[in-house]
Image (cartoon, helix red, strand yellow):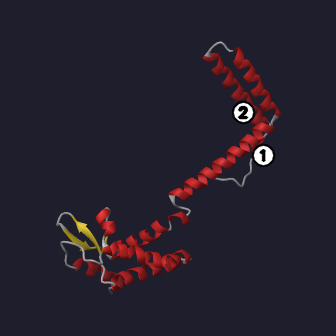
Amino acid sequence: MTNQLDIRTMQAASAPAAAKPQEMDVVCGRGRSTYHHNGNRLFRKIVEQFLERYSNATSKLGKSVVVSDIIVNIRKFGGAFVKFNSSCGTYERVSERIVREKVGQGLRDVLHTQYKSSTGAKRRKRDATKAQYTEQINRIVSQNVNVNAIISDVAYQVNDAESDEECKQLFQSANMRILQDLKDNKCASAMDPSVSG
């Protein structure tokens, strides 16, 4: 038994190719001419109208219904989803799967700042976590009497160092002593466990 999706996919595949897209067609692709094509402008306006519904949908089915509604609206205006076939030099309709991917991506592109999975959101979370860790480490180090004594001692010894190699050895030795002191005093346990990356 053939379902409705299969019928639409077959219709898309059997649709005649055209030398140029129709005025209300949504062109799948990149570039200025694609972006400024009337059908793509209409597509972005329709996506904007459905953003709130899509954003408020709590299930995959709910989001899928919104995607279907956007596709129906594009088709009401006489638009189809097409892609340029460079081997033939014509625009051809794309499959229903690609249509749904295009609409879903259009919605996600506009809503990218709301998604925890977006690159920007991940970067902001990493930066915030890094800043929190840095603040905690600075607090732990500045409040540790032994660490402050080691730092003061090294600062004094560096003034008397005669070579870069001697300075390097002083710093390496101080770092090892600081790390050992922090380990011995279990300073890592003072870190806030709610800060996570």
Can residue 21 be seen at all in this image of the molecule?
A: yes
Q: Residue at x 69, y 24 (%)?
A: 173
Q: Earlier in the sequence, mark 1 or mark 2?
A: 2
Query: Horizontally, is 34 left or right of 180 in the view?
Result: left
Q: Secondary structure at mark 1?
A: helix
* Circle 1: residue type: Ala
Residue to which mark 2 is pinned = 179
Q: Secondary structure at mark 2?
A: helix
Q: Badge 1: how crowded within 10 Å, few (<14), some, or many (20+)? A: few
Q: Residue at x 77, y 23 (%)?
A: 153
Q: Badge 2: how crowded within 10 Å, few (<14), some, or many (20+)? A: some
Q: Quadrant of residue 124?
A: bottom right
Q: Which is more toward the observer, 160 or 16?
A: 160
Percent from the top left, x then y, of residue 32? 31, 62
Can residue 3 be seen at all in this image of the molecule?
A: no
Extreme top residue here?
A: 162
Percent from the top left, x then y, of residue 49? 47, 79
Percent from the top left, x then y, of residue 2? 32, 85
Q: Quadrant of residue 143?
A: top right
Query: Horizontally, is 44 left or right of 173 in the view?
Result: left
What is the number of the mark on residue 100? none
Percent from the top left, x then y, of residue 18? 19, 74
* Circle 2: residue type: Leu
Question: Vertically, is 177 above or below 65?
Answer: above
Q: Which is more toward the observer, 105 or 8?
A: 105
Q: Residue at x 56, y 62 (%)?
A: 116
Q: Label 1, label 2: how many angstroms apart (C-alpha)?
A: 15 Å
Q: Quadrant of residue 78?
A: bottom left
Residue to which mark 1 is pinned = 190
